[in-house]
Structures are given as C-alpha cells and as structure tokens.
Amino acid sequence: MIEWILILLAIAAVAGLLGMGRISGAALTGAKWLAIIALVLFLLVLFGVIGLAT
C-alpha cells in the first residue's frame, strides 16, 4: 500500500510541475486516502484489534 502512495505522490508532483492541476489534485487525494487507510490498519494491528499472525 505504501508503494501505491509513493506512486501517486510522484504522479502528483510531475503533474503539478507540468501544470495539470486536476490530475495532481486527484493523485494527491488518492494518496491521502490510502495514507489514512494504511495508518488506521497499522494502529489496529498495533493495538491488537486485528491479529494478522496466529
């Protein structure tokens, strides 16, 4: 998931430099949502709500 976040951030940076505001905004929004999902999943695993290993 972190790989997708980095890819979307790279797309947003390149699109921003080329003046494509909508594509940059969409990529940033996608990266932001994926980062939030990754953080929530990390916290759930950290506090033991979700047990990934048995």
Image (cartoon, rainbow, N blue to C red):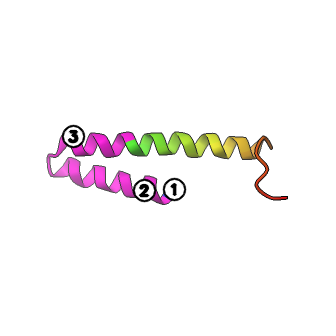
Of mark 2 and mark 3, the one earlier in the sequence is 2
Q: Name the residue rendered at 62%, 39% in the picture.
A: 40
* Quarter in which the C terminus is drawn: bottom right
Q: Residues within 10 Å of mark 3 (few under 14, many from 20)?
A: few
Give the side of residue 47 with respect to residue 21, left or right.
right
Magenta span of residues: 3-29
Horizontal placement of 10 versus 3: left or right?
left
Residue 7 location, quadrant: bottom left
Front one among 47 and 17 = 47
Magenta stretch: helix, strand or loop mostly = helix
- Give residue 25's position: percent from left, percent from top: 28, 40
Mark 1 lies on a secondary structure that is: helix
- Do tag 1 and tag 2 residues touch (Cβ < 8 Å)? yes
Is 18 placed above or below 48 here?
below
What is the C-alpha distance between the residues marked 2 and 3? 18 Å
Q: Which residue is mark 1?
A: 2
Q: Label 3 belongs to which residue?
A: 22
Residue at the spot of label 2: 6
Q: Residue 43's spot in the image, x, y percent?
A: 69, 41
As shown in the figure, which amino acid type bears the numbered disc 2? Leu
